Amino acid sequence: MAYLRISPGISGLSDAGRILSADVHTPQEAMRQKVLERDQHTCRYCGFQSRKYQEVNYIGKQGQSGNADDYACACTFCHQCFHLERVERMQSGAVIWLPEIGQAALHHICRAIYVARISQGPMADAARDALESLLQRKEEAQRRLGTDSPRILATVLQDFLEAKEYRERAGKLKGFRVLPLDRRIIKEGDLEFNQFPQILAYWRSKDGPFGDVPPRRWVNMFYDLRAELNGKKSPPVSE
């Protein structure tokens, strides 16, 4: 399956710059479940699979909802890239300059960082160092773009670009990435809470995508894979 392209955007406009109704982003639960099951709970943008906490993203071209083909399963990190105006409200991302790593790859890296960071030992230390390096890239985004705020970027995309310019935004934003943060502020009624700890706990649980591959095994897995590619047997590494 070919992955869909991640082009940072806003909820009110389609990828082609067509005005969208807010209704298209809130499909009926039956439709949502149909899309998730069809895509096997696998993000169509980066390939991350999780039985819980996946989203559905509108990919229709007519600006109307109606069938499952108008939607694609998306992980929370990929999904928020298409809804930049929500990111600052959820405190779930920042704009960084990172041309050497693609957006989808960054999402895989960040998931590994957040899972490893709450473990123990050298892997946790390496995760904290990696996150700090990524956060430092906000400074270059500020220098090149004038901001690291997804909200300001969303305002520019919504209020200052014609439809043709919006369609070409990927080229204008080349090298900039949306860095997923370890927060996801959700509002339910009058209550607000950070959903990310729940998401992270599920990812690490026995039923989650990282349940069978805890961080302490990652080094051995790396050496095993490298040895397999090289046709050699690798020495064991102490966990």
Image: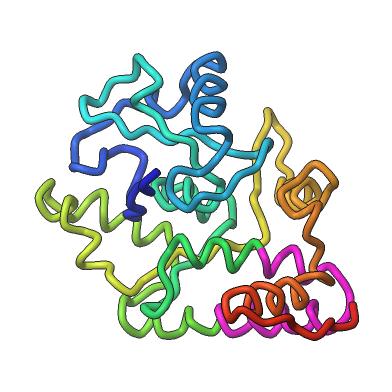
Residue 109 in the image: state x and y as whole percent. 59, 68
Quarter of the figure with residue 228: bottom right
| Residue at the extreme front | 231
Q: Give the range drawn in magenta.
A: 112-134
Residue 210 in the image: state x and y as whole percent. 75, 55
Residue at point 37% right, 25% down? 24
Q: Is residue 148 above or below residue 166?
A: below
Residue 202 in the image: state x and y as whole percent. 78, 45
Q: Is residue 130 magenta?
A: yes
Indicate left or right for 171 with 212 as reference: left
Nearer to me, 203 or 162: 203
Q: Does the magenta stretch include residue 33?
A: no
Quadrant of the image containing the N terminus: top left
Residue at point 70% right, 32% down? 190
Nearer to me, 23 or 160: 23
Indicate left or right for 231 with 104 as reference: right
Q: How many marks?
A: 0
Is the magenta region chiefly helix, strand or loop? helix
Residue at point 36% right, 40% down? 11
Indicate left or right for 54 with 45 as reference: right
Quadrant of the image containing the C terminus: bottom right
Indicate left or right for 149 with 206 as reference: left
Residue at point 71% right, 41% down? 192
Residue 93 in the image: state x and y as whole percent. 53, 61
Colouring style:
rainbow
Nearer to me, 87 or 80: 80
Q: Is residue 172 above or below residue 76?
A: below
